[in-house]
Amino acid sequence: MAKETGRKMIAQNKKARHDYHILDTYEAGLALTGTEVKSLRLGRASLVDGFAQLDGGEAWLYNVHIPEYTQGTWTNHAARRKRKMLLHRSEIDKLAQKLQETGHTVVPLALYFKEGRVKVEIALAKGKKEYDKRQTLREKQDRREADRAMSAARRRQRA
């Protein structure tokens, strides 16, 4: 069997980019069971309620929903179990230092296959206030309107 190359996206957490200011991102491996990997190969997972915590010098991912594998038997996994993230010691120490500050949290942004291995992109984030969320939506809408106006002007010039 040929080895996979590239990055195959499984799930994204678009809500995290809306709810948090992303300060720094990390790529971490995940310690998974066989049925979890098979379920992920079917492209089913949800990161919406997911978060990460440091416990005993190790990084753990909580509330990420990987549904049970349909052909799994008694060896099947629990859908929302905590999963160990594989990070370098220096990255864990940096995260631990930043998490001591108030308002900081670690959220998963994406779950994907990279060269046949499951990776999770996590972000050190700070929660947005409601007015920050409105401001971000307003900026996105203004940018979209400006792009529309510029493309319309280009079309008029060509005609």
Image: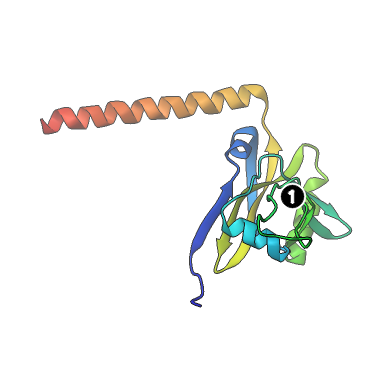
| Between 85 and 69, the one nearer to me in the picture | 69
Measured as percent of width and height from the top left, residue 7 is found at 51, 61
Q: Secondary structure at mark 1?
A: loop
Is residue 119 visible in the rendered structure shown here? Answer: no
Residue at position x 64%, y 49% in the image: 24
Figure quadrant of residue 30: bottom right
Specify whether 127 is left or right of 152: right
Task: Residue 17: give x, y in percent of width and height.
Answer: 59, 38
Residue tagged 1: 79
Residue, far bottom:
1
Horizontally, residue 153 falls left or right of residue 81, namely left
Q: Quadrant of residue 13?
A: top right
Towards the viewer: 17 or 48: 48
For the question of whether residue 72 can be seen, the reply is yes
Q: Position of residue 50 (x, y in %)?
A: 71, 44
Mark 1 burial class by Cα count in 10 Å: few <14, some 14-19, many 20+? some
Quarter of the image with the C terminus in it: top left
How many labels, in total?
A: 1
| Tag 1: amino acid | Ala
Q: Who's the residue at 74% across and 49% down the image?
A: 79
Q: Residue furthest right?
A: 56
